[in-house]
Image: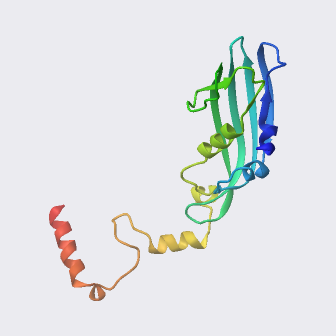
Amino acid sequence: MEKLRYYSVSFAGLSLGVHDFEFQIAQPFFDLFEFEQDFEHPELKLQLKLDKKNNFLELFFDLSGTIEVNCDLTNEPYREEIQGASEVIVKFGEEFDDSDDEVWVIPRGEHQINIAQMVYEMTILALPNKRIHPDVASGKSHSEMLELLEQYGLQEDGETAIDLNEEENDPRWEALKKLKNNNN
């Protein structure tokens, strides 16, 4: 894809040794991919160290920055800091092969390598599995959603916070409670 050319790193004219590259990664980068992301407004920086050897290259990726995600509990947006690091060895061979995450093979005679897919994957893998707004984690949030969760959520004893009148309970539930208590 023509627009991904910006993320091609040329190594043909470089001397042996370590060379530093830096890329600013923002929303237009992610728009180049056809996958929907569950984050917005990325402000990322990629630092790439390319160590050129006689017969291969070593690439060291360091990704850091912030993205906007929604809290899993309140659905309120907040800025999440992310970081990622990776290393790839690039060897020269007959045809391109990036099936191994740690060793890529590029055709002999190539003079550049495109890192866009690697940057995209690093970003996706750096996203947190659980997203909790910092105000929620510190107890400073006064979100309506948290109040509803507290009102209708489970208490420590496993019962719901809803105060149900025993007379309104279905008798079948009482039988199940007896079974549960007998097994404990």
Q: Is residue 57 placed above or below 127 in the rendered structure?
A: above
Which residue is more in the foreground, 62 or 57?
Answer: 57
Q: Where residue 60 sits in the image (x, y, percent)?
A: 68, 26
Q: Where residue 36 sits in the image (x, y, percent)?
A: 65, 57
Residue lying furthest front:
94
The quarter of the displayed image where residue 62 is located:
top right
Q: Is residue 53 placed above or below 147 in the rendered structure?
A: above
Point 69% across, 31% down: residue: 61
Task: Name the image quarter holding the C terminus.
Answer: bottom left
Point 76% across, 52% down: residue: 27
**In the picture provided, is 147 more to the left or to the right than 105?**
left
Point 80% across, 45% down: residue: 3
Task: Name the image quarter holding the N terminus.
Answer: top right
Q: Where residue 134 sits in the image (x, y, percent)?
A: 63, 55
Point 73% across, 19% down: residue: 51
Which residue is more in the foreground, 104 or 118?
Answer: 104
**In the picture provided, is 113 more to the left or to the right than 100?**
right
**In the picture provided, is 172 more to the left or to the right than 27?**
left
Residue lying furthest right:
13
Residue lying furthest top:
54
Q: Where residue 54 sits in the image (x, y, percent)?
A: 72, 11
Indicate the colouring scheme: rainbow
The quarter of the displayed image where residue 164 is located:
bottom left
Which residue is more in the foreground, 129 or 99?
Answer: 99
Residue lying furthest bottom:
167
Q: Is residue 52 placed above or below 115 in the rendered structure?
A: above
The quarter of the displayed image where residue 110 is located:
top right
